Image: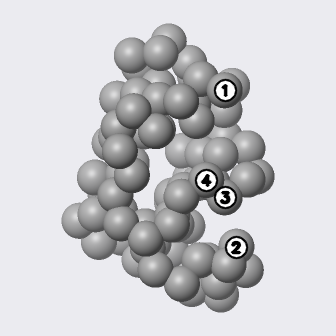
Amino acid sequence: MRNVKVLGPGCKRCDAAVQMVKDAAAQAGVEVTIEKVTDYAEIAGYGIASTPGLVVDGKVVHASGLPKAADIARWIAA
């Protein structure tokens, strides 16, 4: 099971990132837990200045804008 954190204030792009992670996990047949992190201090603790950001199993894999679906699929399957 993968632990994915979506870092951001809860904007439309953040919500879209959550849905993209859900879709990629479903297609890959991988179980994920998704946590939405909206606390700015916690987001900054990951070194993220522009959101949304994605953290997979404790590792920052993306920051600033929506990632490509193919990238999410690769991060989830890795």
- Report the residue marked by disc 3: 60
Asked if the residue at tag 2 contacts the one at tag 1, i.e. Cβ–Cβ closer than 8 Å, the answer is no
**Between marks 4 and 1, how big is the CA–CA gap?**
12 Å
Q: Which of marks 1 and 2 is in front?
A: 1
Is residue 22 at least partly visible in the picture?
Answer: no
- N-terminal label among 3 and 2: 2
On screen, residue 51 above or below 21: below
Residue 61, numbered label: 4
- Report the residue marked by disc 1: 78
Which residue lies at the image location 70% right of the left edge and 73% below the top edge? 46
Determine crowd level at label 4: few under 14, some 14-19, many 20+ residues with C-alpha closer than 10 A. some
Image x and y of residue 22, in percent: 40, 33
Is residue 69 toward the left or the right of residue 44 in the image?
left
Image x and y of residue 16, in percent: 28, 52
Residue 46, numbered label: 2
Provide the secondary structure element on which disc 2 rests: loop
Asked if the residue at tag 2 contacts the one at tag 4, i.e. Cβ–Cβ closer than 8 Å, the answer is no
Asked if the residue at tag 3 contacts the one at tag 4, i.e. Cβ–Cβ closer than 8 Å, the answer is yes
Work out which residue is located at the far left of the displayed protein and give it: 12
Q: What residue type is labelled 2?
A: Tyr
Q: What residue type is labelled 1?
A: Ala
Provide the secondary structure element on which disc 1 rests: loop
- N-terminal label among 4 and 1: 4
Q: Nearer the viewer, residue 23 or 33?
A: 23
